[in-house]
Image (cartoon, helix red, strand yellow):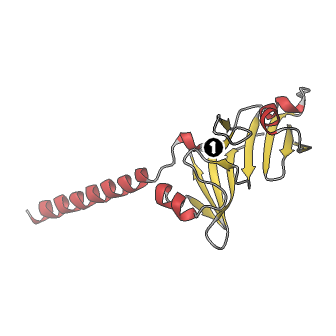
Amino acid sequence: MKHLFQAISCAALLLAALVFAGGTASAHTMPDSEWGLLCDAVGGDGAGVIEFGVGMPLQYAEDFLGSGFDEEEKAIESLRLVYYKYPEITFCGEMQKSDKRPPGEAPIVFIECRSTDFRTPSGFRIGDAFEEVEAMYGRGEVSGSKHVYWFDEARNVSFTVDEAGLIEEIGVHQVIFG
């Protein structure tokens, strides 16, 4: 009888731990809808919101943000990476090295943003207190000053935080497999 009581007690404790841990983890999971950045349409008159995300062609960024960027290309193994570097936001597109299409057709694989003109779908911007992100989604995977939130093994959103606890960069990434 003593062993049965111990077994039931252990099972109850294990179940309570699993329920508590499972509830805590799911309460701070970033939804897929956060995998992108938003920007008010040019003019800021509220006429529309432009969404930028992974998979869109680089030309999409140029269509809405203009041609005021520095273009850079890099070849890494079998890949051709094309960067559109605006003053406060960088878009990187990826194609096979053998792909001869124009750079603007390269699908975006990451965005790194330091501009206050952009925000996440939840409204987080450069200069916001990171504690607001943490309250909604937890700390993420921490590496130095960067907090990374993985959606799966290949997609993530990251927040780089300064010493004052303010967001200084937001990244939207697709892991590049060569």
Q: With respect to residue 126, does 163 lie above or below?
A: below
x, y percent for residue 26: 41, 50
Q: Quadrant of the N terminus?
A: bottom left
The quadrant of the rendering that contains the C terminus is top right
Quadrant housing residue 10: bottom left
In this view, the residue farthest toward the left is 1
- Furthest residue toward bottom: 163
Residue visible at 85% across and 31% down in the picture = 104
Neighbours of disc 1 within 10 Å: few (<14), some (14-19), many (20+): some
Question: What residue is pinned by disc 1?
Answer: 155
Please, which residue is most extreme toward the front here? Answer: 45
Q: Residue at x 80, y 38 (%)?
A: 93
Instruction: Tell me where residue 111 appears, x and y as whole percent.
Output: 73, 46
- The residue depicted at 17 percent of the width and 64 percent of the height is 6
Relative placement, left or right, of 166 versus 42 is left
Q: Residue at x 54, y 47 (%)?
A: 122
Mark 1 secondary-structure assignment: strand
Percent from the top left, x then y, of residue 39?
Answer: 68, 42
> In the rendered structure, which amino acid carries the disc numbered 1?
Arg
Q: Number of labelled discs?
A: 1
Q: Compare residues 15 and 139 and report the one nearer the observer.
A: 139
- Residue 165's spot in the image, x, y percent? 61, 69
